[in-house]
Each structure stands twice: as structure tokens, then as C-alpha cells.
Image (cartoon, grey):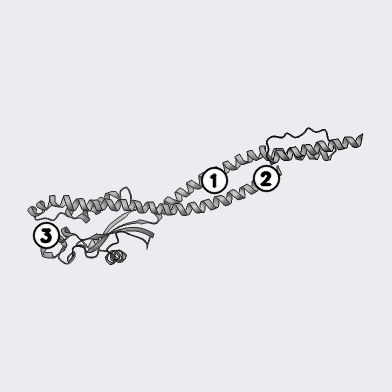
């Protein structure tokens, strides 16, 4: 059985090296794939918020304008940014790790004002109006974060509230005042829709998938090793052991042992056949010497 042990050591070394190489490649692939999945989810969420903005602008605002004028009030539900933020708030109940903000350089509601890094993102779009999407990473107090951003471009309907204070609804001015959110121009990039997610989210997804993959790979490798051992025992170890035992008996002068079985045409069968010929030749030679 010493041959089998040596072969198992070689197999274990080969399997270990192969498993390590596969694990490294899988780790890199799964992490990249998890990041891609997170970005794709962010894009879907972004499309949902963009659709909400369009729906609010084209259908909700026209319905509520008459109500606002009649009651001399301002309904935030007519603002696309407000609707998109509210819809995403409901979406966060299912995806709590994702955050959304309509970061604006000069907003009416100061809660929407872009902070430093958000202003940098907005300026990326302002410096290159042809850019429709921007992704990146940043450091936060709780770790690195990934983000996906799309530009917010002022359209004609935005100027009803954001051109000059005199043109804005009086009810809105009572709430937000006349100091912020004015001076917008048509087609100007005024802000960015930004969806952020901690980098720990794709990392956790990738590591969970990696653990499952390595569990199955290790199990399959061990099962393959067992099957390989069974095949070696019947195809190599047993025939070689029989030849070894027969050679030992012949070396002791016992020439009456039966010939080895020869099955197939592989190297083991050729070796067994050659051994049998040698056995027969030796037996004949010894008989001739005896005569």
C-alpha cells in the first residue's frame, strides 16, 4: 500500500494547488461580479426614480396645479425631486443599504444642497455635458462606499419655480424664501441623482458565494480523490502487488506459482504478459538445468 500512499500525496498536492488557483480566480471573479450586480441594481433603482420624476412632471403636477392656485398653497408632491425621494424611501424598506439623494448646487430646499464630494460629481457632468453616467468610490466614516450618479438637467418646466423669485408660486416662497433655488437656465446641469451603497454589500455577497463555491469544490475534489483511489487500487495497485508477490516467490525458488492474469492492452497488461514470459523462460531454464 506504500505506492498508494505516495500517489495520494502527489494527488493531494496537485488537488491543493489546483483548488488554491481556482479559489483565487473565483475570488476575483465573484468580487467583480458582485460589484457589477450592485451597480446594475443601482441603475434599475435610478431608472425607477427617473421614471417617477417624469411621471410627476407630466401627470401629477398638471392635476394639482389647479388645487394649488385655488387654495393658495404649495404641494411638494408636484415637485419631481420630492416624488423621486419619497418613492426611493419606500424602496429602501426592501434595500436598506442603498441611499438616494438629488444633490443640487443651488436648491430651493437646503436639505438637497450638494456637499463637497457631491458637488465634485455634479461638476463632472457640468464639465462634460455628454456624460450620462458616472460611477466611483469614496471613503466614509463607516468604510468605503460605491456610488452611481446621473445628471439633473433643468428643463422648461423647472423654470416655473427656479427662474426668478417673482415667477415662483407665492405659497412656495412662504415656505422656502427667496434666497435659494433661483437663477436656473434651460439645459443647465443643476445637480445629480446619486445612489450610494457601502462596499461591504458586494463584498459580503461575494464572500458568501465564495464560501459556497469552495465548499462544493472541496467536496467534489475529495469525492474525486476517493474515486481515483478506488480506480488506482483495481487498475494499478492490485496488479503491481500481485507481480511483486510473484517476483518475491520466484526469488525464493518457488516456480510453481500461477501466471498473472493479463487483461487489456495497457502498460500494466503488457508488464504482466512480459512477467509471465520471463516466468515461463526461467522455469524452462531451471528444468533444463535439472535434467
Where does label 2 land, which residue?
A: 5
Image coords of residue 17 (percent x, y): 58, 52
Label 2: which secondary element: helix
Q: Count up the numbered dots.
A: 3
Image coords of residue 25 (percent x, y): 50, 53
Disc assigned to residue 139:
none
Disc assigned to residue 218:
1
What is the CA distance from the residue labelled 1 to the residue labelled 2? 20 Å
Lower position in the chain sequence, tag 1 or tag 2: 2
Image coords of residue 107 (percent x, y): 21, 63
Q: Residues within 10 Å of mark 2 (few under 14, many from 20)?
A: few
Label 1: which secondary element: helix
Q: Residues within 10 Å of mark 1 (few under 14, many from 20)?
A: some
72 versus 163 height, above or below: above
> What is the quadrant of the N terminus in the image?
top right
Where does label 3 land, which residue?
A: 169
What is the CA distance from the residue labelled 3 to the residue labelled 2? 87 Å
Q: Residue at x 9, y 52 (%)?
A: 66
> What is the quadrant of the C terminus in the image?
top right
Question: Is residue 269 found left or right of 142 in the rendered image?
Answer: right
Asked whether the viewer can see residue 175, the reply is: no
Lower position in the chain sequence, tag 3 or tag 2: 2
For the view shown, which residue lies furthest in the right direction?
291
Front residue of this view, candidates 32 and 265: 265
Lower position in the chain sequence, tag 1 or tag 3: 3
Q: Residue at x 54, y 43 (%)?
A: 220
Image coords of residue 11 (percent x, y): 62, 47
71 versus 231 height, above or below: below
Amino acid at each position: 500500500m506504500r505506492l498508494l500512499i505516495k500517489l495520494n500525496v502527489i494527488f493531494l498536492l496537485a488537488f491543493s494547488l489546483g483548488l488554491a488557483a481556482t479559489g483565487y480566480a473565483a475570488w476575483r471573479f465573484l468580487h467583480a461580479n458582485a460589484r457589477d450586480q450592485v451597480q446594475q441594481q443601482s441603475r434599475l433603482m435610478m431608472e425607477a426614480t427617473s421614471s417617477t420624476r417624469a411621471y410627476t412632471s407630466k401627470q401629477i403636477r398638471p392635476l394639482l396645479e389647479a388645487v394649488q392656485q385655488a387654495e393658495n398653497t404649495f404641494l411638494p408632491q408636484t415637485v419631481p425631486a420630492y416624488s423621486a425621494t419619497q418613492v426611493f424611501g419606500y424602496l429602501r424598506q426592501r434595500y436598506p443599504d442603498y441611499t438616494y439623494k438629488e444633490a443640487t448646487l443651488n436648491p430651493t430646499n437646503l436639505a438637497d444642497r450638494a456637499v463637497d464630494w457631491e458637488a465634485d460629481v455634479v461638476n463632472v457632468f457640468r464639465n462634460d455635458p455628454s456624460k450620462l453616467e458616472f460611477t466611483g468610490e469614496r471613503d466614509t466614516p463607516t468604510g468605503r462606499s460605491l456610488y452611481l450618479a446621473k445628471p439633473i438637467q433643468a428643463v422648461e418646466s423647472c423654470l416655473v419655480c427656479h427662474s426668478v423669485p417673482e415667477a415662483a408660486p407665492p405659497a412656495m416662497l412662504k415656505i422656502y424664501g427667496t434666497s435659494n433655488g433661483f437663477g436656473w437656465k434651460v439645459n443647465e446641469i443643476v445637480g445629480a441623482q446619486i445612489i450610494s451603497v457601502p462596499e461591504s454589500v458586494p463584498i459580503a455577497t461575494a464572500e458568501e458565494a465564495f464560501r459556497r463555491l469552495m465548499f462544493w469544490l472541496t467536496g467534489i475534489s475529495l469525492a474525486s480523490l476517493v474515486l481515483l483511489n478506488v480506480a488506482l487500487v483495481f487498475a494499478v495497485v492490485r496488479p503491481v502487488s500481485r507481480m511483486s508477490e510473484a517476483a518475491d516467490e520466484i526469488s525464493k525458488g518457488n516456480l510453481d506459482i500461477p501466471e498473472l492474469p493479463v487483461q487489456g492492452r495497457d502498460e500494466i497488461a503488457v508488464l504482466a504478459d512480459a512477467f509471465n514470459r520471463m516466468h515461463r523462460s526461467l522455469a524452462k531454464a531451471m528444468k533444463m538445468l535439472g535434467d
